[in-house]
Image: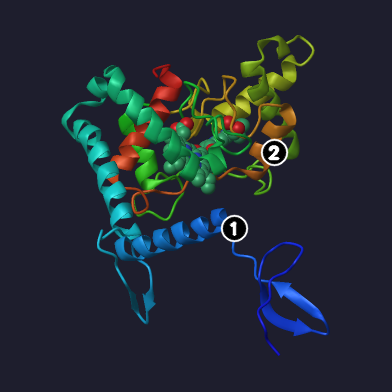
Amino acid sequence: MSEVKRDDLTGESTTGHEWNGLTELDTPVPRGILLFVIVTHAFALIWWILMPAFPLGTTYTPGILGVSQFTSADEAVAENRLARASWSDALLEKSDAEILADRALMVRVTEAGHQLFGDNCAACHGRDARGGIGYPNLTDHDWIWGDGSVADIMDTMRIGINAQHAETRFAQMPAFGREQMLTTAEVRNVAHYVYSLSNPDYSTVDNFERLEAGSQTFATNCAGCHGQDATGIPGSGAPNLTDDAWVYGGEIEQIIASVHGGRVGHMPYWEDRLTPTEIQVLALYVHSLSSGRP
Ligand code: HEC
Ligand code: HEC
């Protein structure tokens, strides 16, 4: 039963439906809301026409503006490449010394190098490149391989150390104790002698004999790799044992562990994983960490 009536109380018409004596007012939609609905619908319609919108099976309506996330991503990548090309080209043209002297260029190199270092090297050498037990500090002036020049660092990165690369740098500290090349007493004595080299106060009258015995063992067993004066032989991989820079720790017990069980550090090679420019940028960055430049 439907009969439109006017409601006495409000003066509005009813919808004309009645349920058990209850009728419903036919109040019009408030103007604000109506306007909002019209505007949003108009906006959606215009958006559909301009922008990519409806899915159509394997494709979609592209919209007349031709906007696409793919083209915007491509443009961003191209822009980035262009920005990098403008300074990475300079890397090819200049010598290492010229690059290091070019402050503006080194700012770019340091930025990119820091990023690459975080992604590829920090897991072992630490975010700040200061290393840790088993991983050398790259910010000091103490180099095991070469003299820390950009070229030497690039070589180490390219071929790795004890890595899978055919030309890899190769070096191993023999396990003198475990392989029974030296007795336990000889291992301890030579370790005390090595400790005394970087801790001169340790050479006292009391342990003169022990250090003397250790020094003999060193001359016959260790000098061939670490040098007569134990300062290491650059390029052989046998580090300087007379300074404060230790890869495996400079406490007596740690030195005994190095001599007893030997040491073989593994540094991956990066020739296949980074581009030559990335390797150069990283080598410049690592070099600058210890040379005090940017
Ligand atoms: C065949 C060459 C060779 C001989 C011989 C050799 N070393 Fe080494 N030694 C190395 C190499 C290479 C390393 C570095 C290993 C690494 O970093 O993985 C090393 C590392 C060490 C370390 C650890 C240094 C650090 O920074 O923590 C100590 C200590 C050491 N050697 C002491 C000795 C002593 C003492 C002898 C003699 C008993 C000796 N070495 C004989 C090649 C040698
Ligand atoms: C899986 C661990 C690991 C990663 C990752 C790694 N390194 Fe190394 N790196 C080592 C170890 C271990 C050594 C020392 C090897 C030895 O001499 O026995 C080393 C040595 C080096 C050296 C020679 C230090 C010296 O005193 O001569 C340089 C330079 C170096 N790393 C740079 C890098 C750079 C740059 C990266 C990133 C691209 C990197 N490393 C990533 C483990 C790592």
**Labels 2, 1: front one:** 1
Disc 2 residue crowd, few under 14, some 14–19, many 20+, Cα 10 Å: many
Task: Tell me the quarter of the picture where residue 81 sits.
Answer: top left
Position above or below: 92 against 42:
above
In the picture, the quarter occupied by the N terminus is bottom right
Q: Answer left or right for 174 relative to 199.
A: left
Can you identify the residue that label 2 sits on? 257
- Numbered badge on residue 112: none
Position above or below: 74 against 87:
below
In depth, the one of 94 and 45 nearer the eye is 45
Q: Is residue 100 visible?
A: no
Q: Seen from this angle, which residue lies furthest bottom? A: 1
Under tag 1, what secondary structure? loop
Q: Percent from the top left, x then y, of residue 234?
A: 41, 29
Q: Find the distance from the CA under tag 2 to the CA under tag 1.
A: 85 Å
Q: Seen from this angle, which residue lies furthest left? A: 93
Q: How many marks?
A: 2
Q: Percent from the top left, x then y, of residue 279?
A: 34, 40
Q: Percent from the top left, x then y, of residue 10?
A: 72, 62
Q: Which amino acid lies under the numbered mark 1 shown in the image of this protein?
A: Pro
Can you identify the residue that label 1 sits on? 30
Q: Which amino acid lies under the numbered mark 2 shown in the image of this protein?
A: Ala
Under tag 2, what secondary structure? helix
Position above or below: 61 against 225:
below
Task: Tell me the quarter of the picture where residue 207 sits.
Answer: top right
Task: Tell me the quarter of the picture where residue 287 sits.
Answer: top left
In the picture, the quarter occupied by the C terminus is top left
In depth, the one of 107 and 41 nearer the eye is 41
Identify which residue is drawn at 39% across, 75% down: 55
**Would the CB of label 1 be found within 8 Å of ligand 2?**
no
